[in-house]
Image: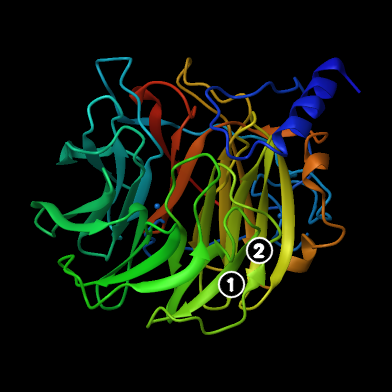
Amino acid sequence: MSYSLAFRSFVLGGLVTACSQSPAEPGPAASVSDAGGDSSGGSAGSGAAFSAAGLAGSGVGGAEGGASSGGSAGGTGGTLPISVNWKPLADAADANVSINVPSVASRGKDAAVAYVERTTGRVMMQRFDATGERIDSPVQLASDAVERSNVTLASDGKQYAACWNVAAEVHCSRVDEQGTVHLNALAVSGQYATIVASAAGWVLAYSGSDKHVRLQSLTPTLDLTGKFVATQRFAQFSVQDIGPLLAATPSGFALVAADQEAGDVDLVRLGADLQSVVSTAALGHNLWYAGQLVATDTRAAVSVSIAYGSFLQLLNEKELTAELPIAGGGKTGTDQALVLTEGGIGAAWLDRSAAWMDGSAAVHRRFFADNHDSDVGLEPRTPENNVLGMQEQGTESFQQLVQVGSQSVLVAKASRYGSLGALRAAALNFNE
């Protein structure tokens, strides 16, 4: 074992009991050559419009091409990084202006990214097209967000809605079909929200004063519809201020949450009335620093970060079916952007060497074809501390995928720390 890897192993041992501590900077990472695992291209056609939440033989390998490698759960991410054409989405004259976790959503023909400027409290939204090019100028949705507020953005196919934290409340604004901004259209008592579009309007998931997840139905204009549904579940991350992992499905919703604070999380499927409709599926991990979720009625993908890595998990309508460990990142770990596409689920994440200095950053991508979860597999499951010894792929980035028309677009912030100018977009194909 190299000195660097041994040091990281020592650090990880200390992190096991430090999940409640907020990291100020990324932890040390071993210098390891790029993973050169095999991959196999999977075919993905055009997908439906996707609104984002508060991201693997026979079409289940990476989209880079090459030999088949479904692989066991003990393998690496199994992809080679590719170059993409990055385009700027957000720029700031002040290099000290930084943003929290950005959020993206698509309304079909265009998409948008929302972000909070920490030093100004402004919530901004920038629209872009299927190539990642900006559409018009950014619009301001608020000026009162707290410094460490998260932001969540969704679209119902016509409008955009965004929410953020103001003191002990969640505030939301709406951008209608004509582009008019309806400022502070909603305010509810709570924190750390995720908004998604529903058949009747919107659903807001957020943490109440007791830290339990609350689910609130909203009209298309963000008015309250009845009283919130009080769950007995927790969905707060250990160190990062992120909203609950909630996704809309054709018949209801999917929620990732735990039955005890800081406990291991489950995937809970909910009906249109926000009540549980099937047994929960245990994921076997807690919420550390970052995570993403996409779901249909019969399938779901969840990315959950751990220290120095992450787990990308696949599920059917009732249970966990596959788990892929991906190493990299500092003590904040990594996460993967996820998108629903025709015939499967696409995943992408920035390479561990990601940097904007030369205007480029390499990307890993995988396509998980429907009915092929067994090619990735579930046994034997890799213990979290063993991920530390694997070849690194990811970095401490934030990224999300959206489907704009028939094109997938990756939006990324190259570093979890740094300037606003690091927000970029790139068209990404899963059928090459």
User: Picture coordinates of residue 25 (x, y %)?
Assistant: 55, 22
Which quadrant holds residue 267? Answer: bottom right
Between residues 360 and 51, which one lies in front from this camera angle?
A: 51
Residue behind mark 1: 299
SS class of the residue under badge 1?
strand
Asked if 317 appears above or below 294 in the picture, the reply is below
Q: Residues within 10 Å of mark 1 (few under 14, many from 20)?
A: many
Disc 2 residue type (three-letter): Leu
User: Picture coordinates of residue 233 (x, y %)?
Assistant: 51, 66
- Give the Cα distance between marks 2 and 1: 8 Å
Which quadrant holds residue 60? Answer: bottom right
Tags 2 and 1 touching, CB below 8 Å: yes
Question: Can the viewer see residue 431 in this picture?
Answer: no
Asked if 138 appears above or below 154 in the picture, the reply is above
Residue at the extreme right: 1
Disc 1 residue type (three-letter): Arg
Q: Residue at x 52, y 33 (%)?
A: 397
SS class of the residue under badge 2?
strand
Identify the colour scheme used: rainbow
261 with respect to 408 (left or right): right
User: Picture coordinates of residue 9 (x, y %)?
Assistant: 81, 28
Between residues 11 and 270, which one lies in front from this camera angle?
A: 11
User: Picture coordinates of residue 288 (x, y %)?
Assistant: 59, 45
319 with respect to 134 (left or right): right
Quadrant containing the N terminus is top right
Which quadrant holds residue 238? Answer: top right
Question: Can the viewer see residue 162 in this picture?
Answer: yes
Which mark identifies residue 14?
none
Asked if 16 appears above or below 42 in the picture, the reply is above
Q: Residue at x 61, y 50 (%)?
A: 304
Which mark identifies residue 314?
2
